[in-house]
Image (cartoon, helix red, strand yellow):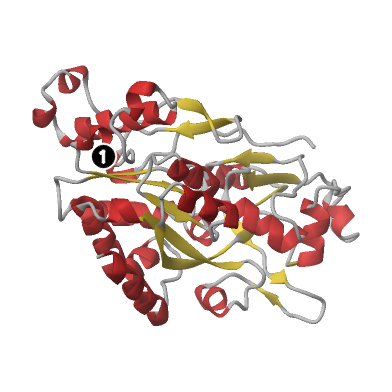
Amino acid sequence: MILGGKVDPFTKTSRRHVTLSAPTIETPDQTGRAERTSHPLPETSMADMSMPEDRRPRSARIAALACALALAGCGGDEAKKGGGSAGSPGGDSEAVVVDGSSTVYRISTAAQEGFAKLDEKVEVVVGNSGTGGGFTKYLRDEVDIVDASRLAKPEEEAKAKEQGLDWLRFTVGYDGITVVVNAKNDFVKELSVEQLKRLWGPESQVKTWKDLDPSWPDREIKLYSPDDKSGTFEFFTEAVVGKARSQRKEVQPSADDNILVRGVAGDADGMGYFGYAYFKANEDKLRALPIRKDKDSPAVAPSPEAILSKAYAPLSRPLFIYVKKKSYRRPAVAAFVKYYLENVADLATRAKYVAPTAEDIQANEAAAKPAS
């Protein structure tokens, strides 16, 4: 399938702390495959970098920390000497390192920005290498917190326990994976889960809109999808196709949801899926499709109410952060997590997701107490 729409993979920045995007670095994951991770760096200068560390501007200290994390991700011996997580390289930096889901990234960056106004001494670095990428880094003891748009897998939990890397899990919001088409597409009014499976399944023979519905145009569909490290990819494929990580190959994948947004927005025959917040931030360029769970159910469009009630099925899901227990004992991490949880309803809403329920907030408080 020919894919349309050119996109620039170096335009995403990490908001308050980042103004430049660094080159992509390839590091081996646990299976030996190359893991592509973009380490964004804030604006700085050579003069800044030449100053003694304790006198450098905050932006330069963030840059140095991000560089240290990039080296740690490469697995070099020097990067490993400090011990512990990458949240405290060398053991003497007040830092909190968060990585994982590009969906939860929006909530964690909101927490990052708010917390920075309260404590200038703590550097919070937020990455978005996907839920799978975040857990991979966690199991290498490189991060303090994993942003996750799915539950941890049994094998991830088992490995964490084997390595003494137990965690605390907190619910930080709710999302509805949103299936979108170009705003100019006026013929697709809704889709059923059966149609989604026919289109996205690994054995799909669907090439054109007409293949899905005889009344639709005989034009090729251009598909945009999260990459295979994404929790959104895993959740969607399991919910729609029936098997996690099982999807047709004729798609344009990206770890960056903004690239997927631009792909669909720039292609009249584009279709893609990603977190609800990325649709809400771009609803002037995209149209969200109501989804029909089965032939006896009405088509339901994603909305905060439908997501929270799970009427938007089967694509509603909770969002989590996983906090390493040994990191939580560090004052910097404990302070950041405390701020995050005390403000989580507002943070999730600001990020354009659905806030946790009162029951979720009580459960978060109860989960945090044993580690405090």
Q: How crowded is mark 1: few (under 14 residues within 10 Å), some or many (20 or more)?
A: many
Q: Name the residue under label 1.
A: 88
Tell which residue pokes out farthest to the right in this image. 214
- The location of residue 9, given as percent across then percent down, is 51, 33
Q: Label 1 sits on what residue type?
A: Ser
In the figure, residue 19 lies in which quadrant?
Answer: top left
> Going 76% across and 58% down the picture, which residue do you hit?
241
Tell which residue pokes out farthest to the left in this image. 55
| Left or right relative to 165: residue 289 | right
- The location of residue 54, given as percent across then percent down, is 10, 31
Front residue of 336 and 300: 336
| Quadrant of the image containing the N terminus | top right
Up-down relation of residue 118 to residue 137 (above or below): below
- The location of residue 34, given as percent across then percent down, is 57, 29
| Quadrant of the image containing the C terminus | bottom left
| Left or right relative to 357: residue 268 | right
Up-down relation of residue 140 to residue 162 (above or below): above
Front residue of 190 and 292: 292
Q: Can residue 273 be seen in this view?
A: no
> Going 28% across and 59% down the picture, which residue do you hit?
337
Front residue of 285 and 165: 165
> Going 19% across and 43% down the picture, which residue do you hit?
94
Up-down relation of residue 133 to residue 244 (above or below): above
Q: Can residue 191 be seen in this view?
A: yes
Per the image, label 1 sits on a secondary structure element best described as loop
Up-down relation of residue 249 to residue 291 (above or below): above
Counting every numbered tag in the picture gives 1
